[in-house]
Amino acid sequence: MEQRAKPHATGRVSRGDITQRVGVEQLEARGVDVDALIDKLVDAVGAEFTTYYYYTILRMHLAGNEDYKEICEDARLEDRAHFELMTPRIYELGGTIPYDIRTFADRAGCPDAYLPGVDTSKDVTGRVTEPYQGSAADILTVLLEAERCAIRTWSEVCDLTFGKDPRTYDLASRILQEEIEHEAWFIELLSKERDGVARPSGHFRRGEPGDAPHSKNRPFYNP
Ligand code: ZN
Ligand code: FE
């Protein structure tokens, strides 16, 4: 009996060719500019990675506000998880993160989340020279604005990939969900700290700090 032609057995990428990817061919066929997408993803994971670094410093300087430190720790570890979730996708698409971390940090799509009120140009010794004078409200404002930048970034990635690149879209949308939560957390904390107003975020405990429901291939959160 004659076999019917298999519609998906052939395409632009020929049999055994390892220099091209069908996973990329199919995106291009659907109108994705893959080079532009890789660039966008490198900028975006650069922001996650640098945010993880800067949140380490911000968290340290929330000294004494143990509840704020816990929330900051959730956001910090989840941002690291975002870096790790999306970076493999850059490689699948045929890209790489920059070989030089300085290039990577400069490319980050969001501003550096510097410790507020500190002159970083004088920061050459790596030693604490004078007591930190900033307030918790100042630090919470930096945290809040960093989350807002992340929401804008991942929303853009969702727009670029919706209906065309289901894999990148799925990863970006899981990250976006957590960034939206992070914004709500810092609105809650800043609102109370700065204005004395309750604006609940709906935050439930994550289990262990950084135990994020969306970024670890888990559809449901198991405490
Ligand atoms: Zn993040
Ligand atoms: Fe975040």
Image: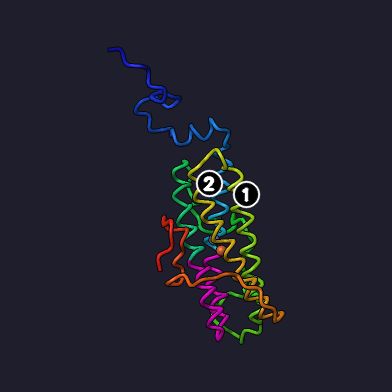
Q: Residue at x 60, y 75 (%)?
A: 123
Furthest toward the top, the residue is 1
Furthest toward the left, the residue is 1
Point out residue 110 in the picture as x, y percentages from the top left corner: 63, 59
Q: Residue at x 55, y 74 (%)?
A: 57
Point out residue 188 in the picture as x, y percentages from the top left corner: 63, 73
Upstream in sequence: badge 2 or badge 1: 1
SS type, badge 2:
helix
Around disc 1, counting alpha carbons within 10 Å, would you say few (fewer than 14), some (14 to 19), or many (20 or more)? some
Q: In the image, is residue 165 above or below residue 97? A: above
Residue bearing mark 2 = 169
Q: In the image, is residue 81 above or below residue 27? A: below
> Label 2 is placed on what type of residue?
Tyr
> Label 1 is placed on what type of residue?
Glu
> How far apart are labels 2 and 1 at the CA level?
10 Å
Image quarter for ligand 1 equals bottom right
| 126 is within the stretch colored magenta | no
Point out residue 202 in the picture as x, y percentages from the top left corner: 57, 69
Q: Can the viewer see residue 140 in this picture? A: yes
SS type, badge 1:
helix
Side of 57 where 11 appears, left or right: left
Q: Residue at x 53, y 83 (%)?
A: 66
Q: Quadrant of residue 124?
A: bottom right
Q: For the stretch drawn in magenta, what is the main secondary structure?
A: helix
- Residue range of the region highlighted in magenta in the rendering: 51-77
Furthest toward the right, the residue is 195
Point out residue 176 in the picture as x, y percentages from the top left corner: 56, 56
Side of 15 where 97 appears, left or right: right
Q: Can the viewer see residue 122 in this picture? A: no
Residue bearing mark 1 = 156
Q: In the image, is residue 58 above or below residue 51? A: below
Q: Quadrant of the N terminus?
A: top left
